[in-house]
Image: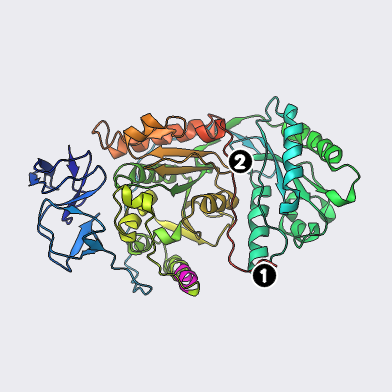
Amino acid sequence: MDIIRIHPADNVAVALRDLAAGETVTYKNADGSEGSVTLLEPVTRGHKVALFDIKTGESVMKYGNPIAAAKQDTPAGSWVHTHNAATRLSEGGEYVYDHHVYDLPKVAEKTFMGYRRANGKVGIRNELWVIPVVGCVNGIAKQLCEMNQDLVDGTVEGLYYFPHPFGCSQLGDDLATTKKVLAGLVKHPNAGGVLVLSLGCENLTPEIFKEAIKEELGENGADSDRVKFLICQDVEDELEAGSELLKQLAAYAGSFRREEIPASELIVGMKCGGSDGLSGITANPTVGRFSDRLIALGGTTVLTEVPEMFGAENILFARCNTEEVYHNAVKMIEDFKHYFVSHGQVVYENPSPGNKAGGITTLEDKSCGCVQKGGSAQIMDVLSYAEPIHTKGLNLLSGPGNDLVSCTDLTAAGAHMILFTTGRGTPFGAPAPTVKISTNTPLFEKKHEWIDFNAGTVAQGLETLDEAGDRLLDFVLQVASGKQTTAERHGCREISILKDGVVL
């Protein structure tokens, strides 16, 4: 198969390999019949070719949705991209709740080997985390982690810190956001022990922060076995004091052992970045098949990157479980559009140069591919930025498209791991294990030290999306049971916190 027509309503197909001018290529229609088109010009893998003549102003159809308007008459066989197609998006939008329910697949019960915490939550890693509440102590956090690697022993699987520049000289919503994200990291069950590191004079005081994590602490905000505080200005030698606290935390974390846990307790975040024209055909729908399977088992998945829902909102809105969830989803979209407009930006300033090089023409094109990760399950809840996940099933989480910011968002909300699809590749990792899924086999082969799972097999015709989804479910359960991701092996763990206002 050289090109794929995704939906019967589509007037373009996507090239599965580099195609030369003059080639005649065939594609399958929904009824099983074949169509063909002769290329008028070269078309690179992941890019679109017109299957029929498209007149100026007519919609370019992909995924069964309009993803652009033709800027000029475009004959069948033409390359369709930014030179001859443009977005239809604007800051406005009209939405109607037209509820649809789809059957989920039947999946045999599955388990993984995780850590059951004292509060009943489940972790898939048993690590020690040092959380600086202010950027001023990033260097101390780094030294403490470097000095105490001998604590990584037995069932203690790692010692990590997460630097950031915030926690002081922030006002209002920005300070609240920093507190919310860092509190989410402290509460994360992948950490068997957490050292919270303060300087002593920052805006985000220990008293304020302790209120945000009070359920993790003892009476009157006292340190617990799992969470301990160090105010560096209050001690003579912060490295000695911090090392002693880490030893206590390691002793506590080391008491945990992996045990069999139902897959229903797994929470998985879903994200894409460095996307290409195959993202919505291979990797993203593979993740969607996985999501449906995990939800069928009683588990939870989380979809974020709101700006990359613009233009595909109605695909999601139709699956909102109730009208209340629908109205919350509409508000999430409209609030993010207002965020763009309030900063003097248009909502459709996307895709990125790399996305365009990979074959994505407009934001609608990108969004229709992006939401494939959500599968076909009902949307059960809509969450604000870094809000803790508390409803099983498919959740929408407010957050930007930026990879590091949104993956930090997913981790702080409580995702045990993140599935990250990519057509161009990226080495980064969130604090939660980050599984990189390639959209195409050449990327998997070229960047095997970045990529964990290859969905390019779908484009090669080696497996169906359902088969790839089954394989991904098995792989996720292996990661949940301790299999390291490439990002983990290379020590790639970063956070980035959303900021909107002034810095004092």
Quadrant of the image occupied by residue 265: top right
Q: Nearer the viewer, residue 340 or 265?
A: 340
Look at label 1 and name its amino acid. Gly
Badge 1 is on which residue? 172
Relative to 63, say whether 299 is above or below.
above
The answer to whether residue 435 shows anywhere in this view is: yes
**In the drawing, does residue 63 fall left or right of residue 134?**
left
Disc marking residue 122: 2
- Asked if disc 2 and disc 1 are in contact, CB closer than 8 Å, the reply is no
Residue 299 at what x, y percent from top left?
48, 45
Residue 281 at what x, y percent from top left?
29, 45
Quadrant of the image occupied by residue 21: top left
Relative to 135, say whether 86 is above or below.
below
Say which residue appears at 71% left-offset and 47% top-offset. 131
Q: Nearer the viewer, residue 248 or 91?
A: 91
* Quadrant of the image containing the C terminus: bottom right
The answer to whether residue 372 shows anywhere in this view is: no
Chief SS of the magenta region: helix
Which comes before the other along the chain, label 2 or label 1? 2
Look at label 2 and name its amino acid. Val
Q: Point out the stretch of residues depicted in magenta.
A: 335-341
Q: Nearer the viewer, residue 16 or 78?
A: 78
**In the drawing, does residue 276 fall left or right of residue 336?**
left
Q: Separation of disc 2 and disc 1 at Cα?
A: 33 Å
Relative to 72, say whether 256 is above or below.
above
Give SS at disc 2: strand
Q: Residues within 10 Å of mark 2 (few under 14, many from 20)?
A: many
Q: Is residue 411 magenta?
A: no
Residue 457 at what x, y percent from top left?
30, 33
Quadrant of the image occupied by residue 158: top right
Give SS at disc 1: helix
